[in-house]
Image (cartoon, rainbow, N blue to C red):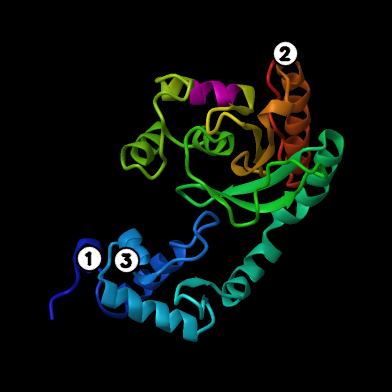
Amino acid sequence: MSPEPNDRAAGVQGAAASLLNGLKVLEAFRIGRPSLGVTEVAQIVDLHKSTVSRILSGLAAAGYLEREQENGRYRLGLGVIGLAGPLLAELDVRRLARGPLEHLTLQTQETSALSVWNGTGAIVVEQAPSPQFVKHTAYIGTRFDRYESSSVRVFLAALPESAVSQLLETGQIARTATSGLGTDVAAHLAQVREQGVALNDGFTDPQEFGVSAPVKDYRGEVVGCITLSAPRGRISPEAHADLIAAVRAAAEEVTDRLGGAPAKPES
């Protein structure tokens, strides 16, 4: 039997290919699509339905997926938490950011979150939700891969231009040309890098406001990102400066706890 197109393209065969395909299937499940059927997964990961069906059954048997009895669809199981738990427990930036996040939310009454970069997106690893009834939330595990997201631009600003270009050209980071951020990506990211903050003033959604600032370690490398999110209708333009200052202060506090020394932008 000849290898499937995915295996040939990747140049990986046998057990290694099966393992990678299993990981791809797990990654198909997102906050916005927690429940998927065999056909949907096959389309997302570009594998044959028969292969996907076997992988789903195996992952369910191992506890990494659960099958919904009423419709036969799948969703992530508790076994995934067992895998992620040790990583989250050992993630210093997450542990050290908890206090500053809670203070930021108390100060602003809006949701604050910590994200880390996985190479192709910003992943939320900690959150302090707003106490208000109407709020924006970023649950742990949420992945952002749109250029217009303030957290994504903070991480992109720390990457070489060639890496940014590749992410955009391959579509791993999606970008909307009419978002209002302009067409000169390099110039914009240089501004983000210089100011130490990125703003999302309705760029991802007309109702969404966000501001992000980088967290750096003792080497000066960006290892995380503090983001404040809120319904845009509640945030007046006059409030932007205070919220930016609050987010930047929270990020600098976490950076200080990691032994870093953030460069503060000139006033």
Residue for badge 2: 267
Residue 10 vertical placement versus 50 (above, below): above
Secondary structure that dominates the magenta span: helix
Looking at marks 1 and 2 on the same chain, the residue that comes earlier in the sequence is marked by 1
- In the rendered structure, the answer to whether residue 247 lies left or right of residue 13 reads right
Looking at marks 3 and 2 on the same chain, the residue that comes earlier in the sequence is marked by 3
SS at mark 2 in the image: loop
> Percent position (x, y) of residue 142?
58, 53
From the viewer's perspective, is the residue at label 3 or at label 2 nearer? 3
Q: Residue at x 37, y 37 (%)?
A: 168
- Foreground residue, 245 or 138? 138
The range drawn in magenta is: 188-194
> Percent position (x, y) of residue 179?
46, 25
Q: Amino acid at mark 2?
A: Ser
> How far is the residue under mark 3 from the one under mark 2?
52 Å
From the viewer's perspective, is the residue at label 1 or at label 3 nearer? 3
Q: Residue at x 37, y 75 (%)?
A: 19
- Foreground residue, 200 or 116? 200
Residue 11: assigned label: 1
Looking at marks 1 and 3 on the same chain, the residue that comes earlier in the sequence is marked by 1
Q: Residues within 10 Å of mark 2 (few under 14, many from 20)?
A: few
Residue 93 shows in this picture = no
Residue for badge 3: 42
